Image (cartoon, rainbow, N blue to C red):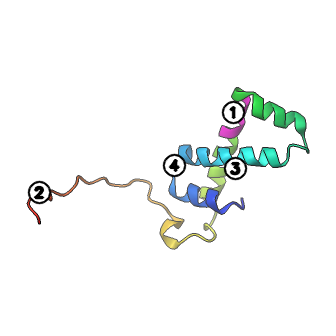
């Protein structure tokens, strides 16, 4: 996978959020290459259930491969191994501070 934005997205987001980014990338790739296979382009763009299945499968496969790659190329060390869980703390009481 060469798209740095998708690589970064996979490093810092859960798979469901990456699928949204991937869908936009996939649609643009279909448009760029529509002259190579017009039949599959037309079906992908006009058949919503087909588009959903193709996008979901391809996004999950891309996410799996991106997350299992040895090191995320070009990413800061802080996002190479993203936290699986984040502890959410309640806000500090600032009503008595000026």
Q: CA distance from mark 2 to mark 1?
A: 51 Å
Q: CA distance from mark 4 to mark 3?
A: 17 Å
Q: Quadrant of residue 10?
A: bottom right
Q: CA distance from mark 1 to mark 3?
A: 16 Å
**Residue tagged 2:** 95
The residue closer to the viewer here, 95 or 3, is 95
Where residue 73 appears, as percent x and y from the top left, is: 64, 69
- Mark 2 or 1 closer to N-term? 1
**Vertical placement of residue 54 versus 26, above or below:** above
- Mark 1 or 3 closer to N-term? 3
Q: CA distance from mark 4 to mark 1?
A: 19 Å
Where residue 30 appears, as percent x and y from the top left, is: 79, 44
Q: Which residues are magenta?
A: 50-56
Q: Nearer the viewer, mark 3 or mark 2?
A: 2
The disc placed on residue 25 is 3
- Mark 2 or 4 closer to N-term? 4
- Mark 4 or 1 closer to N-term? 4
Badge 1, how many Cα within 10 Å: few under 14, some, many 20+? few
> Please, what secondary structure does the residue beneath circle 1 have?
helix
- Mark 4 or 3 closer to N-term? 4
């Amino acid at each position: 996978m060469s798209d740095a934005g998708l690589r970064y997205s996979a490093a810092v987001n859960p798979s469901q959020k990456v699928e949204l980014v991937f869908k936009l990338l996939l649609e643009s790739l279909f448009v760029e290459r529509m002259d190579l296979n017009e039949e599959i382009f037309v079906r992908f763009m006009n058949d919503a259930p087909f588009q959903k299945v193709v996008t979901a499968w391809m996004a999950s496969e891309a996410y799996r491969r991106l997350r299992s790659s040895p090191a995320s190329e070009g990413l800061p060390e802080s996002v190479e191994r993203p936290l699986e869980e984040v502890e959410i703390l309640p806000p500090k009481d600032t009503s008595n501070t000026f």
